[in-house]
Amino acid sequence: MILSAGKYYAIPGITSLADLQKLRLSEIKTSVAHRGLETTGELVAPIAPEIELWGAGVTYLRSRDARKEESGVPDVYQRVYEAARPELFYKGNASRTRTTDQSIGIRFDSSASVPEPEVAIFINRFQEIIGYSICNDVTARSIEGENPLYLSQAKIYVGSTSLGPAITPAWLVPTAEAMTISAKIIRGDHEIWSAQTSLAALNRTLEDLVSYLFRCQDFPYGAILSTGTGIIPPLEISLEEGDSVEITVEGIGTLRNSVATIPENPQISQ
C-alpha cells in the first residue's frame, strides 16, 4: 500500500512486498506513480514471509569502539572494521520482526541489552536499492561480549528486531549527509540516553554491502539489510522492562517501541 496524506492506497498489480521486490527499480517507480483505490489496513512490519532480514556489523567507528569495550577479544572488531569483507549475519524473518508501537524484547539471561538504531535498505532481486526504513537491531550486549561466537544468540530471538514504520522509496530519501539518525531511551518520565549520527558516517558504501550480501546467495524476492549502527549506549546504560525506545531518521520517520522481558520459554508462557 501507498501512504499519502494519512490515507492508504493500493498499488495496481501488487499484492505484497514480495511482488514489489521482484521488480526492477524503474518498474517500481512506474507502479507506485499509478496508485489505485483508497484502502484500509493494519500497519505491520514491512517484511514479507518470503523475505529475509540481514544485518551488517561494525560499519561505523562508534560500533567498532563499543564492541571493543564490551569484548574480551577486542582485536576481532578492529580487524572487521578495517577488512575488505564486511560482517554480515542473518537477523530474522517476518515472524520475528516487530514494528512501531509494538514491544521489542530483552533476553531474560542477558545482564545487559541495548538498542542499535540503524538504517535498513530494501533490495530487489536485481541488487538495486529500492527503499529505506528504520531498524532497531536489539542486541544482548553481555552475551555477545562474552564471546563473539555467541552473536546469533545475542541477535536472534523473540522481539530482537523492530522494523518500520514504513518504506520510503529510494528516489525520495535525502542525501546520506542529511539522513540523520537520532535515538533515545525513555524510562518513566526521564530520557536516560540520547545520541545522533548520520548515514554519511558509514565506513562502507551501501553498494559494497549489497554486493557482499548477494555473493553466493539466492534472493528471488530480494532482501532487507540493516546497515549497522553508529550510536550505541555507553556500558552503564542497559535496557529495562518498561523502557521506551525512539529512533528517528530524517526523511524516513520515527520507530517507537516499548521494552519487554523475553522469558526462557515464551510460547509456554503465553
Image: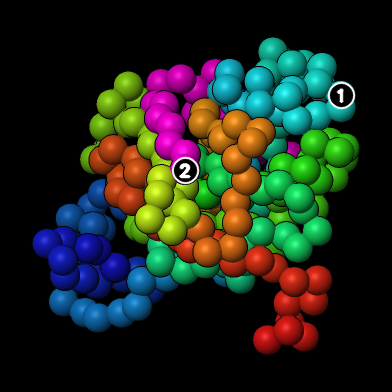
User: Closest to the observer: 124 or 83?
Assistant: 83
Residue 165 visible, this angle: yes
Residue at the spot of label 1 = 73
Numbered label attached to residue 24: none
Image: 163 above or below 95: above
**Quarter the N terminus occupies:** bottom left
Looking at the rendered structure, the secondary structure element under dot 2 is strand
Q: In the rendered view, does 140 fall on the left or right side of 222?
A: right
Q: Which quadrant of the view contains residue 221?
A: bottom right
Nearer the N terminus, badge 1 or badge 2? 1
- In what quadrant of the picture does the C terminus appear? bottom right
Q: Residue at x 47, y 39 (%)?
A: 193
Relative vertical location of residue 52 with respect to residue 203 in this rendering, above or below: below
Where is mark 2, residue-wise? 192
Is label 1 in a helix, a strand or a loop? loop
Please identify, in this view, whether the residue under mark 1 or under mark 2 is nearer the observer.
2
Q: Residue at x 43, y 58 (%)?
A: 188
- Which residue reaches farthest left? 5
144 on left or right of 137: right
x, y percent for residue 143: 81, 45
Which residue is farthest top? Answer: 82
143 sits to left or right of 90: right
Percent x, y for residue 256?
Answer: 40, 57
Label 1 neighbour load within 10 Å: few <14, some 14-19, many 20+: some
> Of the residues shown, which amino acid type is indicated by label 2?
Ile
Residue range of the region highlighted in magenta in the rendering: 192-217
Q: Quadrant of residue 80?
A: top right
